[in-house]
């Protein structure tokens, strides 16, 4: 059964971007090299699984942008209580943590050097 390429790329985002974001929310800090390696591994996995090359992420920022745009495009719930919607919105926009205290990457949170 054929599967929509866009849906495959969204699932790839679940294993890439969402997992990294979740690790950050649990207090796990990763270096930029670890983040880049993880995204590269999932880019390769997507290639092997048949995701179209133009949908494979080049970076965390690429995958984040695609995934969040897809959530806006794909997710249209009938009704969500306001407090749940606000919590989901805040959670989805949490930046990824990085251990390098001098990071200037606007998508990554600076870690306190303490």
Image (cartoon, grey):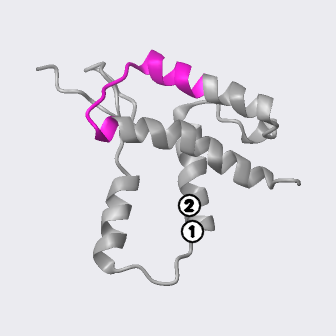
* The N terminus, quarter of image: bottom right
Q: Nearer the viewer, residue 21 or 113?
A: 21
Indicate whether 85 appears above or below 63. Answer: below
Horizontal side of residue 43 vs 64, given as left or right: right
User: In the figure, is residue 96 to the left or right of 5?
Assistant: left
Contact, mark 1 vs mark 2 (Cβ under 8 Å): yes
Magenta part of the protein: which range? 24-40
Against 2, is 55 above or below?
A: above
In percent of the image, x 38 and y 41: which residue is there?
A: 22
Q: Looking at this view, is 49 or 17 the one in front?
A: 49
Give the class, few, some or many, for how many residues have Cα within 10 Å of label 1's Cα (few <14, many ≥20): few
Q: Is residue 87 above or below residue 18?
A: below
Q: Quadrant of residue 91?
A: bottom left
Secondary structure of the residue carrying tag 1 is loop
Q: Which mark is residue 33?
A: none
The residue identified by callout 1 is 75
In the image, taking residue 25 as reference, residue 4 lies left or right, namely right
- Please rate how many residues cluster around mark 2, counting C-alpha atoms within 10 Å: few if below 14, some from 14 to 19, many from 20: few
Between 61 and 34, the one lying in front of the other is 34
**Residue at the spot 52% in from the left edge and 44% down from the top edge:** 64
Q: Main secondary structure of the magenta part?
A: helix
The residue where tag 2 is placed is 71
Q: Residue at x 33, y 24 (%)?
A: 103
- Residue 97's image quarter? top left
Which quadrant holds the C terminus?
A: top left
> Residue 5 at what x, y percent from top left?
79, 50
């Amino acid at each position: 059964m054929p599967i929509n390429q866009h849906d495959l790329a969204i699932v790839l985002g679940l294993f890439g971007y969402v997992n990294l974001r979740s690790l950050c929310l649990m207090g796990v800090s990763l270096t930029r090299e670890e983040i880049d390696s993880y995204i590269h591994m999932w880019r390769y996995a997507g290639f092997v699984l048949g995701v179209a090359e133009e949908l494979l992420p080049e970076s965390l920022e690429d995958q984040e942008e695609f995934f969040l745009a897809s959530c806006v495009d794909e997710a249209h719930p009938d009704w969500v209580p306001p407090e749940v919607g606000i919590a989901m919105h805040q959670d989805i926009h949490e930046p990824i943590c990085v251990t390098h205290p001098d990071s200037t990457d606007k998508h990554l949170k600076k870690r306190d050097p303490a």
